[in-house]
Amino acid sequence: MREITYSEAVREAMSEAMRTDETVFMIGEDIGIYGGAFGVSRGMVEEFGEERVRSTPIAESVIAGASVGAAMTGMRPIFEIQFSDFVTIALDQIVNQAAKIRYMYGGKAKIPLVMRTPGGSGTGAAAQHSQSLENWTAHVPGLKVIQPATAYDAKGLLHAAIEDDNPVMFYEHKLCYRTTSDVPEGKYTIPIGVADIKKAGTDITVVATGIMVHKALEAAEKLSDEGIDIEVVDPRTLVPLDKQTIIDSVIKTGKAVVVTEAVKRSGFSAELASVIVESESFDFLDAPLVRLAGKEVPIPYHPDLEKLAVPQVEDIVEACRNLVKG
């Protein structure tokens, strides 16, 4: 099996879907000749033309509204929001239209819409271009929310999202774009709502999302030298959330650390923690659950301060080490 980057995997999924289904098209800012803010759609306008790879003015609310209307009338748009921070501009269309229409029309209208957006810190893009706001959309009934960490997961889950008749938020962390993994050629799908154990272990369960999956795996490698065996669980999709995989892992290990990049206050880390403490796995905990998440500050521009604002590998190592020591 060949190894490709996360961004190549996303591009492959979109291209494969567009080759086989003429109702699939892309719409968003600078996605044509420029190839998108992070080059994910590079080369696609040359293959599919400007009718199906539609570059737009800077108007997220208008683009979102057009995408909702297209989805209602039989198309399957892939709407790219250039930075996930700008989901805020399109929230009325996403929250009050896309998420509600199928319910309000008794299922007679479908909204097969995928909203792709890069999020997170680590690129020096500062406060308005580095946030992790996935919990905002995860809070809204009617939206599915996907946050793949690897190229393999990104391609399989994007195919599943494009085929879904419901609106799907698809969060891609900027730092994941250059990561690589083994990815099959051709189309394959990963079921939405199924978590993945990225590394099996016996001592501590680390539930991590997005780029934190990679940091958790790095931490697990370092801790293995100390004889501490970490299990890394990647939910992959926030909505629907595969609770049972998390619960079973904590029952096995007896200790839990939850790691997300988003700000700790009201963040998705709290939802993941509640899965553990509100289930039978709580009775198996040998120590208090630990939550690692972003600081309650805007993301700084300076690289050293930026790293301090979100969990790093060393933070995960220290948290796990302290849990073992008691």
Image (cartoon, helix red, strand yellow):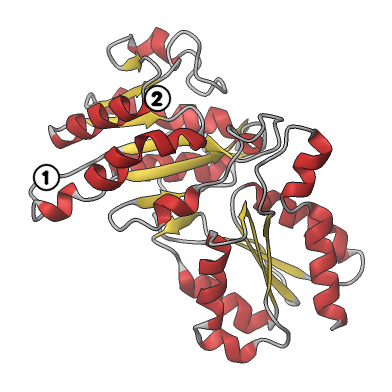
Residue 270 drawn at (x, y percent): 55, 67
Work out which quarter of the rendered image holds the C terminus and state it: bottom right
Label 2 secondary element? helix
Task: Name the residue at the bottom extreme.
Answer: 283
| Circle 1/circle 2 CB separation < 8 Å | no
The label number, if any, that marks residue 109 in the structure image: 1
Q: Quadrant of residue 53?
A: top left
Please state which amino acid type lies under the numbered disc 1: Ala
Q: Quadrant of residue 15?
A: top left
Please state which amino acid type lies under the numbered disc 2: Ser
Residue 262 drawn at (x, y percent): 60, 52
- Front one among 223 and 302: 302
Work out which quarter of the rendered image holds the N terminus and state it: top right
* Residue under pointer 2: 15
- Front one among 318 and 124: 124
On screen, residue 220 versus residue 1, left or right, reads: right
Task: Select label 1 or label 2 by which is in front.
Answer: 1
Residue 138 visible, this angle = yes
Residue at 29% across, 25% down: 62
Q: Earlier in the sequence, mark 1 or mark 2?
A: 2
Residue 232 drawn at (x, y percent): 67, 63
